[in-house]
Amino acid sequence: MNQDYIILMEKLKKINAYNMALVLFQWDNATAAPKRAIEHTAEAMGILSDAYYRALTGDDMSALLQRLNSASDLTPEQHAIVLKTAEMYEEIRLIPADEYAAYQTLLAKADGIWQNAKLNNDYASFAPVLKEIIAYAKKFAGYKAQARNYSGPLYDMALDGYEKGFTTEVLDEFFEKLKASIVPLVRLAVKNHALVDNCFNFRRYDIELQKKISRKLAAHIGFDFDRGVIAESAHPFTTSLHNKDVRITTAYLENNLESAMFSTIHEGGHALYEMHIDDAFTCTPAGTAMSMGIHESQSRLYENNIGRSRAFWEPLYPMLKETFPEQLRDVTLEHFVKGINQCVPGSIRTEADELTYCLHIMVRYEIEKMIFSQEIDVLDLPGVWNDKYEEYLGLRPQNDSEGILQDIHWAGGSFGYFPSYAIGTAIAAQIYDHLKKVMPLDQYLAEGTLTPVSDYLKEHLHRFGASKPTMQLISEMTGEPFNPDYYIQYLQEKYTKLYSA
Ligand code: ZN
């Protein structure tokens, strides 16, 4: 084997060890750690981040990667690992070591400040730390623009961290297209709201029984409990240490049946992707999803396109009804499937229905664009937020907890992340259409056989991890480039049918 490659693998083992420790702390902070732990945990995370930074940007790394980049005796997998490591290296070395560690410590603290602010509806207590995070985010984006000699919008550099190729120019057009087709459908749904009932969803559902259902649903779509666990957290999420340790969380609400079920299917979709990545990439920079958009396409595909279809529930609904016989006694399968597809504009993104979801993303996209293009007083942001909700969704959030404080992303420094939810949703519709062409999808779902679906996704998408660019993955799998028209067509067909009197 190439000697340089052996040296690189030794370095990656160390880099990965620091990263795993950081991911575990993040997981622990969100699921099990007591509130007061954070002051010392934040410090430890700062030190680990610093060690991670130094291991990745060590003196000889640049020359090593350069030699490997032109080596002719690497396998395609090894070459992909070299490329991803070089990409990571280039990105991180733009940031000075002291700024990187200070930023990581700030983020670890910001999490707790945001949680308290949200709990107490106290945006003012979060504003100063948000201001600091924004300053860092803009500074880091500036470093990247400078290194690339990029003179376009600064926000493009933030977007680039999550989904390459989706600049503000591309996204403006994408969101305009979505807005033009979604807004009239939402109006139709609001006008004919009486056609769809989901009162059953808000009856009382025992949480222990909900947990059993969640595990069954995860297993049903192919979640491997030998490689993954399900825990609880306020906000459901997925994290992965490597393809044999993938963790998802769910939040259970006693008076909401759908919430935990669909978040388990959603996070389960993310988990399948991570679990199916080829062993050749395990514990390397290529051993993760290619981008956030493609990651989100897998969760959305399972949650919405598949998980809200009648065929999916045909074999499962009897089990659900058996578990909750009282609550669902007057609810037929037909009624249930209509109910889980109901569209009601609301103020909370994570509770949004499939139709209004992207409007929530548009609000965040436009605010982020504004933050990166001008000097903005963070104290003005709640007002901007509320105005945009009124414009796109026809409602004003009752308070900041249900408004600007609802999402964790900005507290985590994740500017540029939100658009990947909308991109992923559109990719999911394109893949769903493709699956229907290459296999009898509804028949499989109705039979309760989901293995051919996950096998196909593994073979054509998951196994590649981060070794192939998103656009290439989509083209090779579906036979055509990314095309949001599939998504628009899917929504139009589904919601016109559901809400036409
Ligand atoms: Zn997701």
Image: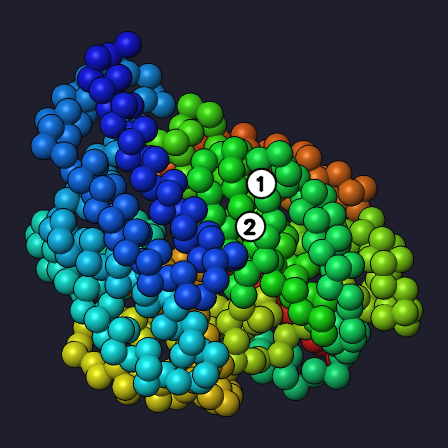
SS for callout 2: strand
Residue at image mark 1: 228
Q: CA distance from mark 2 to mark 1?
A: 8 Å
x then y, percent, for residue 121 = 44, 85
Q: Residue at x 40, y 57 (%)?
A: 420
x then y, percent, for residue 456 = 59, 34
At label 2, counting other C-alpha atoms closer than 10 Å, the crowd grade (few under 14, some 14-19, many 20 or more) is many
The mark nearer the N terminus, 2 or 1, is 1
- Is residue 411 positioned above or below 54 on the image? below
Quarter of the image that includes the N terminus: top left
Q: Amino acid at mark 2?
A: Ile
Say which quarter of the image contains residue 416.
Answer: bottom left
x then y, percent, for residue 417 = 36, 60
Residue at image mark 2: 248
Relative placement, left or right, of 130 versus 275 is left
Say which quarter of the image contains residue 310.
Answer: bottom right
- Is residue 397 positioned above or below 371 on the image? below
Label pair 2/1, CB-CB below 8 angstroms:
yes
Q: Is residue 194 visible?
A: yes
